[in-house]
Image (cartoon, rainbow, N blue to C red):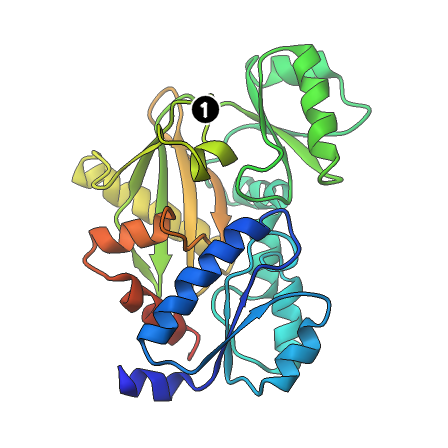
C-alpha cells in the first residue's frame, strides 16, 4: 500500500462534529482512522468544532476524508468551505450534498424526473391533519426534511398522532414532510466510484428502521444477497444509479429504497456520507462483493483524485 499512501498525501479525517449524529460520526471516524493507520497513509484526525477552518489550514492537508454525518457535514456546508480552501475531498459536491440532505426538495426533483418515490406532503402549522392523512392512505411516516439516521421520524396512523409527530419533527427542522407509509421490503444500495455494490435487504422487529433499530437493536437483520432475483437486483441497481446521478452525486454514497404493496421500488433518500461503523451498511455490501474495509477506504479516497 506504499504507493497508495504516497499518492494520497496527507489526509485530514473529519469526524465527530456538532450535529445530532455526532455519536455515529465518532464511531465512523474511529473505524476509518484505524484503516488509514493500517494502510500507512499519513492522516490527521480532526474532531470538527468551531475552529475547523483554522485546523484545516494549520495541518497542511492534501485532501480530506469526510466522515461527518448530518447537518454541517453532509449538507453542502462543509463541501463549500473545502472548495473555497481548494482542498480535494471525498464524496459529493456542494449542490448534490445539499439536495440529498433535503428530503423535500430531493423528492420534488425525483418526481419531476419521473423517478419513483412515495407520495408526500410538506407539513406546517396550517396543515389540515385529517386531509393530509386521508390523502396519503391513512398511514404515514413523518420526517424532518434535513436530518439523518432516522432522527425525528415517526410512524403515524391517526390525526392526533400526526400533529404530535409534526411538532416533534419541527423541533429539529423548520421543514417537515409526511410520506405515504410503504409496506414492502426495505433495501439499501451502496455506490462506490461508479460501481453498484450488492443490495442489502433490511428487516427490523420495530415499527420501522429507526435510530434504535440501526444502532442498538439485536433484532435488526441484514441480508446480502438480498433475496431478489438477478433481474430485480439489476433493476434496483439501475434505479439507484439513476437517483444518485440525478442529484449529481459523486465518489460514494448509499441509496435507500422500499418496495410498495405491489412490489414496485420507491426511492427514500440518498446518503452522501454513509456510516462506516462496524454495523454500517456500505462496509457490509463491500464485504459481500469481496472488498475489505481497508480496500473500501482506498477506493473512496482514490475517487477523490479525479
Q: Residue at x 25, y 48 (%)?
A: 198
As helix, strand or loop, the secondary structure at mark 1 comes to loop
The number of discs equals 1
| As drawn, 215 above or below 139 | below
52 displayed left or right of 263: right
Query: Quarter of the image containing the N terminus?
Result: bottom left
- Location of residue 172 in the rendering, given as x and y in whole percent from the top left corner: 71, 39
Tell me which corner region of the image, top left, top right, bottom left or bottom right, holds residue 174: top right
| As drawn, 49 above or below 147 | below
Q: Residue at x 35, y 68 (%)?
A: 35
Residue 173 visible, this angle: yes
Crowding at mark 1 (Cα within 10 Å: few <14, some 14-19, many 20+): many
According to the image, label 1 marks what residue?
182
191 displayed left or right of 224: right
- Residue closer to the observer: 295 or 75: 295
Check the image and name the residue furthest to the right: 126
- Location of residue 239 in the rendering, given as x and y in whole percent from the top left corner: 37, 45
Query: Quarter of the image containing the C terminus?
Result: bottom left
259 displayed left or right of 106: left
Q: Residue at x 61, y 16 (%)?
A: 135
Q: Residue at x 59, y 84 (%)?
A: 59
Tell me which corner region of the image, top left, top right, bottom left or bottom right, holds residue 95: bottom right
- Location of residue 300 in the rendering, given as x and y in whole percent from the top left corner: 38, 68
- Location of residue 299 in the rendering, given as x and y in whole percent from the top left corner: 33, 69
- Residue closer to the observer: 83 or 107: 83
- Residue closer to the observer: 253 or 230: 253
Residue 210 visible, this angle: no
Amino acid at each position: 500500500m506504499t504507493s497508495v499512501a504516497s499518492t494520497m498525501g496527507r489526509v485530514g479525517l473529519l469526524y465527530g462534529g456538532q450535529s445530532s449524529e455526532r455519536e455515529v460520526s465518532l464511531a465512523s471516524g474511529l473505524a476509518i482512522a484505524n484503516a488509514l493507520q493500517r494502510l500507512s497513509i499519513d492522516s490527521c484526525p480532526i474532531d470538527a468544532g468551531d475552529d475547523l477552518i483554522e485546523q484545516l489550514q494549520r495541518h497542511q492537508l492534501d485532501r480530506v476524508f469526510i466522515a461527518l454525518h448530518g447537518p454541517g457535514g453532509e449538507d453542502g456546508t462543509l463541501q463549500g468551505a473545502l472548495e473555497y480552501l481548494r482542498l480535494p475531498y471525498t464524496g459529493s459536491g456542494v449542490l448534490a450534498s445539499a439536495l440529498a440532505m433535503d428530503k423535500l426538495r430531493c423528492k420534488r426533483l425525483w418526481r419531476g424526473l419521473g423517478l419513483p418515490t412515495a407520495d408526500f406532503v410538506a407539513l406546517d402549522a396550517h396543515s389540515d391533519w385529517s386531509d393530509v392523512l386521508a390523502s396519503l392512505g391513512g398511514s404515514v411516516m413523518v420526517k424532518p426534511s434535513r436530518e439523518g439516521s432516522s432522527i425525528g421520524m415517526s410512524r403515524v396512523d391517526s390525526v392526533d398522532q400526526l400533529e404530535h409527530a409534526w411538532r416533534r419533527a419541527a423541533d429539529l427542522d423548520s421543514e417537515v414532510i409526511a410520506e405515504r407509509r410503504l409496506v414492502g421490503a426495505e433495501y439499501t444500495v451502496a455506490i462506490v466510484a461508479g460501481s453498484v455494490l450488492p443490495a442489502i435487504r433490511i428487516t427490523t422487529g420495530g415499527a420501522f428502521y429507526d435510530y434504535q433499530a440501526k444502532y442498538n437493536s439485536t433484532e435488526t437483520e441484514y441480508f446480502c444477497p438480498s433475496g431478489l432475483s438477478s433481474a430485480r437486483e439489476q433493476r434496483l441497481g439501475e434505479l439507484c444509479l439513476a437517483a444518485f446521478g440525478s442529484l449529481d452525486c459523486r465518489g460514494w454514497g448509499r441509496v435507500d429504497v422500499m418496495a410498495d404493496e405491489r412490489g414496485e421500488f420507491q426511492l427514500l433518500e440518498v446518503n452522501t456520507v454513509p456510516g462506516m461503523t462496524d454495523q454500517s451498511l456500505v462496509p457490509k455490501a463491500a464485504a459481500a462483493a469481496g472488498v475489505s474495509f481497508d480496500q473500501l477506504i482506498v477506493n473512496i479516497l482514490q475517487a477523490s483524485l479525479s
